[in-house]
Image (tube, grey):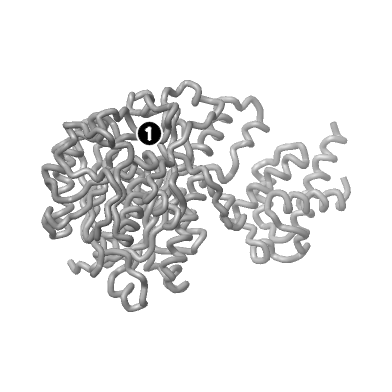
Amino acid sequence: MTQRRVVITAASAISPIGHGREQIVESLLKGKSGVTTLREDELISRFIHSRVYGTVSYPIAYDFARQHRKTMGPVSYYACQVAKDVLGQAGLPGDFVTGGRLGIAFGSIHGSPTVQRNIYKIFFEAKDKATYQGIGAVDYLKSMVHTTAVNISKMFGITGRIISSGTACTTSSQSIGYGYEAVKYGLQDAMLCGGADEYDTITVAVFDNLLACSTAFNDHPGQTPRPFDRARDGLVVAEGAGAVMLEEYEFARKRGATILAEVIGFACNSNGGDLILPNLDGITKTLRLGLENAQINASDVDLVSAHATATKMGDIIEAQATGAVFGFQPRVVALKSYMGHTMAACGAVETVMTLYMMQDGFIAPTLNLEDIDDRCAMITHVRKLTEYPVKTAAIQNFAFGGVNTSLLIRKLT
Amino acid sequence: MTRQDIEKEVRAIFLREFEVENPEPDVNLREAYGFDSIDAIELLLEIEKFLGSELTQAEKKKAMDIRTLNQIIDYIERLAEKRQATAETK
């Protein structure tokens, strides 16, 4: 089967540390955290032990027409905004965008929980017909699991294939990976890829009840999460969105597109066992499969963006797997230390941030990494802002359900 | 309920729910204002609220052929007359 080269021609993110390149780079350079206090939802938030959240706390000037807004929950606002950003940056011709050779790979962990909550409120409380009619005709379109992908498709008239992974924390790394494969094997010439998740206290409650959320820094939100640190005490749930535009290399080059990087490899596997616990063997295999797919050696990788949620076991297993595959050669950064875990968006958001660092020649340090856990010490942690010409980076993400991904990108020289 | 009352309410619904100000009475709503099938369902709910009574499935299906503002007003006028007649026979 013919294999084509795939490049990234645009990238954007809405994250707790900023929207778009300028704000995000500034936050990374200044070591600014986007973790704040959990908002009260007047429902379950008062029972949650973890009082921190990676929050998009700045206004976003959306400019979406009513005909699009009417099928969008909060998650689709994020998704459509980053999609709009990358479509604007990429500058693809209008007839190409609508012509069927541009597809979409975009997802969220479970659509819009805000809209779903309103539906279920009526489900449990409806006592008469009038209350029942509170379930809007468009509530499903706003809340369904592929709502982000199809709202992007509708807003921009994109008619290619739709892939909408919903694999929790690997949702958007799969989006990029499967988008890469769609372009690589000629199924599409370009793919708009990413993921999004909206503010949601239920997600916090789920992790809180699993004792996986950070609780020890409730009064100092900026000091958590603490990936690989001895004092880490769990993850911090966050909101946001990330997107990249992937294009076939020759197509991008001929039209004079700005090429940010090349996607050189992708791997995804599953642990085939426990749905919660991280699996050293499964993760190690993923990282090796990624290198194999990219046809490079471990020593070629100079930066690893770790999944690193700051859970006790997750960080240890990831450090062991990363150390076993890469050794001390690449520098390792845990970008969730800046913003928490953006759930479905994390793979794309962390890829976008890695691209920014690659472009600007620096590596941001892992925040809050003051005392490296000995059990995570078999890799090279970045602890201070480092000027470095990153050429090849690996972005690692792992999800509940035992899904693992590794994405490899390289700067074109 | 006069035809003028109905028109006033329909125009208010269009402004409030569909952000369409002063729609032309006889233009195709889809072509002129992007009024689509989702909007049509929302409009039926608004009509039920306005009339203060539920529409039957058969009545809702009749609405599927509506294309213009005047046709909406005609449709509501007939529904209102039917309900008035039903009320008077009771």
Residue identifier under label 1: A223
- Where residue A230 sits: x, y (%)? 25, 29
Instruction: Please identify the residue farthest to the top as the structure is shown.
Output: A47
Q: Position of residue A331 (x, y in %)?
A: 21, 49
Label 1, residues with CA under 10 Å away: few <14, some 14-19, many ≥20:
some
For the question of whether residue A168 can be seen, the reply is no
Query: Residue A214's x, y, as percent?
Result: 36, 28
Residue drawn at the location 19% of the way across and 35% of the way down:
A376
In the rendered structure, the answer to whether residue A54 lies left or right of residue A61 reads left
Q: Amino acid at mark 1?
A: Gln
Which residue is drawn at the image coordinates 54% and 49% (left, top)?
A72
Query: Can residue B62 be seen from the camera position used here?
Result: yes
Q: Is residue A313 above or below residue A47?
A: below
Q: Quadrant of residue B45?
A: top right
Question: How many labels were placed on the picture?
Answer: 1
Q: Quadrant of residue A227?
A: top left
- Residue at 49%, 62% (x, y): give it: A156
Picture quadrant where residue A409 is located: bottom left
